[in-house]
Amino acid sequence: MNPFFNELGTAVLKSWKQENFSLDKFPEIARAALAMRPPGEHVDLPRFLHDFLVDDAQPSQTESGFGEPEIIVYENARFYIQLLFWMDGTTAIHQHEFSGAFHVMSGSSIHAQFEFEKPKPITPYFAVGDLKMKEICLLETGCTVPIVSGRSCIHSLFHLDTPSVTVVVRTQHDPGTGPQFNYLPPRVAYDPVFSDPLMLRRRQVLDVLEQVQDPAYVDLVLEMMRELDFERGFYTLQYCMSHLRDLDEWSNVMETFQKKHGALSEGIEATLEEGLRREVIKSMRSSISDPEHRFLLALLLNVRARPDLFLLVKQRFSDASAIDTIVRWATELLEETDSGLAILDASFPQEMGGESDDEPALIVSALRKILDSHCELPEDFPEGVLDRVRSGLADSSLRLLIG
């Protein structure tokens, strides 16, 4: 057992005992203990990993899939301390059934906090409401953040460095604060632990029908929309969305769902669209290792307004303007494709205007103009290029750059 984490756990236990193990007091106790002795300043991580691998005198480990991986470094009947490694992980927007605090031991993260207004339970495992972002900030190494169980602490983390390492001091479980919902903006909360075997099998059957190109696929999905309850209808839409779009039947199926559920379905299509957008951005992360480019992905995933994007870029890269930094990233990410040029998933057709050798420069110039309305384009700048670049951005995860 690592002596630092044993001392940290002992100190937390002593302070919490003095407060009669009040759950309300625990987040501040955990935060203060981590801030007083930051693990990154007291733990030799390579040495810790060596000892963990060869020394059997370790706290009991869980089979949790949270973290890449999770290591329990201190355990007590009331709370424990975990070390979480993050390689490509990005947490869903979620709340907790426990309380405590987390500390950025190594790396950095974009931290977004939300509130879920006007919640309306549909089942014990599914609800609709209005998910709104309260705050977004950059967490650097050494930052410590309290965790409050329940809906008052809804957040997500996008880890920027590989690996990022966080230390979490947390209770075992806070009664009455479950389920531990995940959130799909802007409308849905769901229990990720709840299992519906019938829906699992239905998805598998739909998958078979899709693969064999069954002509009855769309009619069957339409009948499901007319017959299933709201929750199962939502999950069916979520699963079938991409294929229905390929078949040009998405609008028809979505309208059937909306007709059945009326006002309750408000915002559901936007939620499904946002879910696809977020999955596209997350999938890019596995092929992008540059920390600055991963920072851009984090902003595209989490930021809702262009001024906030500029603010966070300036916060992290204070020696350059936000616009210059974003244009540089775009230039570095610009690449040729079979159909033209692309920046991440923003596609720009061949023959944008002028000679083909000039097309990358045209795209970059147009992007700068889009980001800065005061920027002057050359008098001979080809007509229509600005609109084509704006259109390519609008149909991609980079649409935030349009403003």
Image (cartoon, helix red, strand yellow):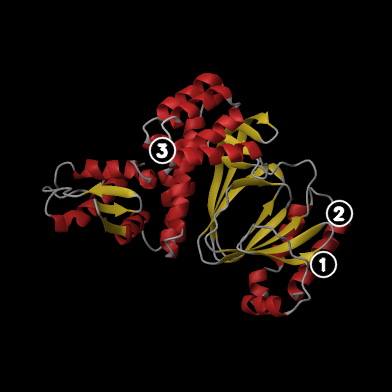
Q: Earlier in the sequence, mark 1 or mark 2?
A: 1
Query: What residue does disc 1 label?
Result: 10
Q: Residue at x 88, y 57 (%)?
A: 18
Give percent across and percent down for residue 378: 15, 50
Q: Is residue 318 left or right of residue 48?
A: left
The answer, for residue 39, to whether it is visible in the render is: yes
CA gap between label 3 and label 2 equals: 63 Å
On the rendered image, what quadrant is the C terminus found in?
A: top left
Q: CA distance from mark 1 to mark 2?
A: 15 Å
Residue 85 drawn above or below residue 348: below
Front disc: 3 or 1: 3
Under mark 3, the amino acid is Gln
What residue does disc 3 label?
A: 213
Q: Given the image, on which type of amino acid does mark 1 rest?
A: Thr
Say which of marks 3 and 2 sits in front. 3
Q: Are marks 3 and 1 in contact (CB under 8 Å)?
A: no
Cα distance in 3D space between marks 3 and 1: 61 Å
Going by the image, does 241 lie left or right of 224?
Answer: left
Disc assigned to residue 19: 2
